[in-house]
Image (spheres, rainbow, N blue to C red):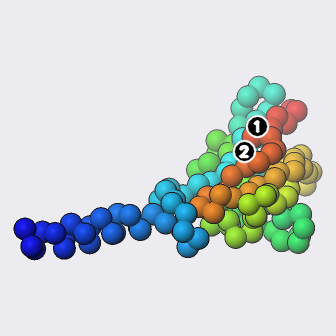
Amino acid sequence: MKISMPLFLITCHILLFSCRSDKGVMCTQEYRMLTITVKDTASKPVILSTYFVKKTTTGEIIDYSREDSIYRIQGIYFICTDGKMGMTSKEGTEFEFHGILGTTEVVNEKYLIGNDACHVKMLSGKTEIVIPK
């Protein structure tokens, strides 16, 4: 029993503290990605030529185009991920999604993105955008 008690305490300690953020909040180990869907009027996915997300207050550009090839085919685009949580505030930070087809900007939508100290969360903005043919 003496050997198993320290092992039990160490295991409990690891389980208890392994899912904490640096702010002392209990967090899950999942990685969140906020996405939107872009479709045409026939509900078919729109594959944009290019797109980017801009933090409104600083003009900083986020380019997810290297990370989303499988999603893009389905018309799904990243707005923000946990990897960019440092760019957001708990109360929310404004971002703009810009989508381009050929040389024409067909999407320009505003989003308010916040965080709960663990993950990003969408506070406002459209999750589905319909582009006329």
Q: Position of residue 32 (x, y in %)?
A: 59, 54
> Within the image, what quadrant is residue 94 found in?
bottom right
In the image, residue 63 above or below residue 110: below
Asked whether disc 2 touches disc 1, contact meaning CB atoms under 8 Å apart, the reply is yes
Residue 77 seen? no
In the image, residue 102 above or below residue 43: below
Where, quadrant-wise, is the C terminus in this rendering? top right
Secondary-structure class at tag 2: strand
In the image, residue 28 above or below residue 38: below
User: Crowding at label 2, few (<14), some or many (≥20) Cα neighbours within 10 Å?
Assistant: some
Label 2 to label 1: alpha-carbon separation: 6 Å
Looking at this view, is 71 or 102 the one in front? Answer: 71
Residue occupied by mark 1: 128
User: Crowding at label 1, few (<14), some or many (≥20) Cα neighbours within 10 Å?
Assistant: few
> Within the image, what quadrant is residue 113 found in?
bottom right
Residue appearing at x 72%, y 44% in the figure: 36
The reply, left or right, for residue 115 in relation to residue 94 is left
- Please state which amino acid type lies under the numbered disc 1: Glu
Residue 127 seen? yes
Secondary-structure class at tag 1: strand
Residue occupied by mark 2: 36
Where, quadrant-wise, is the N terminus in this rendering? bottom left
